[in-house]
Structures are given as structure tokens and as C-alpha cells.
Image: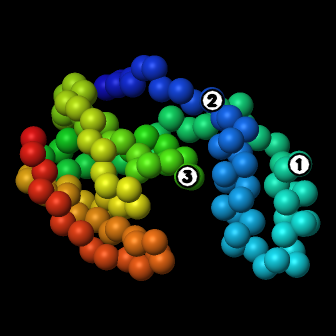
Amino acid sequence: MLTRVVGADLSIRRQDLDTVLADRLREVRPERRPGMRAFLEEAERPPTRPAYGEFLVDQEDHLWVAAYDVIGRPAPAWYVFAPDGRWLGTVVMPARFRLLQVGDSWVLGVSRDELDVEYVRLYALQR
């Protein structure tokens, strides 16, 4: 079975690179940032970003495919496919929510607040 999602913009914009660079530099001690900045700016970059991020299979054997998660953008969309490969729809999760499991009428995951404190969340799912 081969299923394609057509029309996704996979280009890497300068703004995307700047956002990733700033995010990575926040993780480095201040005195090491100039060297890390130079290293990251000189690194070879791919011509496009990945088309997808994660995959999950729910309890009804539907395939959930996450769009690639770009730093600084809202939560990625999840494309849902039937076991026979038919596209069923797209589900957008709340911002800062990481999907872990999908049931017949619910989704389970972890959300983070502005201080990166994690909370387990269970949301209703309408099919």
C-alpha cells in the first residue's frame, strides 16, 4: 500500500532556520554560544524538511501520521488513514501537546505549560 499526501510545503525558509538556531542556542551555556552559533550556521542543510514526524496506530488499526513539527509553529496536524489506506481526515491537537495513544473515542498525551511543566491529558475524540 502506498499513500501520498500531496501539496505539503516542504521548503526550508530563513525564518525557520533562525527559529531553530535560537532554540538550540538557548540550550547552550552563554560562554559557548558564539562557537555553537558559528558551527550551526556553517552546517550543511538539507534542501527540504521531512514530510512527516511520528506515526501511531490506534486501537482500530488506523494509521496516524504527524506532519513534521517545526519549532515555533503551532502543534502539528495528524493525518488519519483507514487500514486500507484511505485518508479519513486531519486532526489538529492543542498547542504544546504530544500525542501518545489513540483510543476509539479519546486521545491521550502530555501537554506542557509555559514553564515546561508536563500534564497528562485525555481528550474526547469524535470520529
Label at residue 110: none
Closer to the eye: label 1 or 3: 3
Tell me where residue 67 appears, x and y as whole percent.
43, 40
The residue drawn where x is 66% and y is 61% is 23
| Mark 3 touches mark 2? (CB < 8 Å) | no
Label at residue 72: 3
Assign the N terminus to one quadrant of the image. top left
Where 9 falls versus 64 (above or below)? above
Q: CA distance from mark 1 to mark 3?
A: 22 Å
Tell me where residue 121 appears, x and y as whole percent.
24, 69
**Secondary structure type for disc 2:** loop
Tell me where residue 98 appears, x and y as whole percent.
37, 61
Q: Quadrant of residue 28?
A: bottom right
Of labels 1 and 3, earlier in sequence is 1
Tell me where residue 45 appears, x and y as whole percent.
76, 41
Q: Which residue is mark 1?
A: 42
Q: Which residue is mark 2?
A: 11
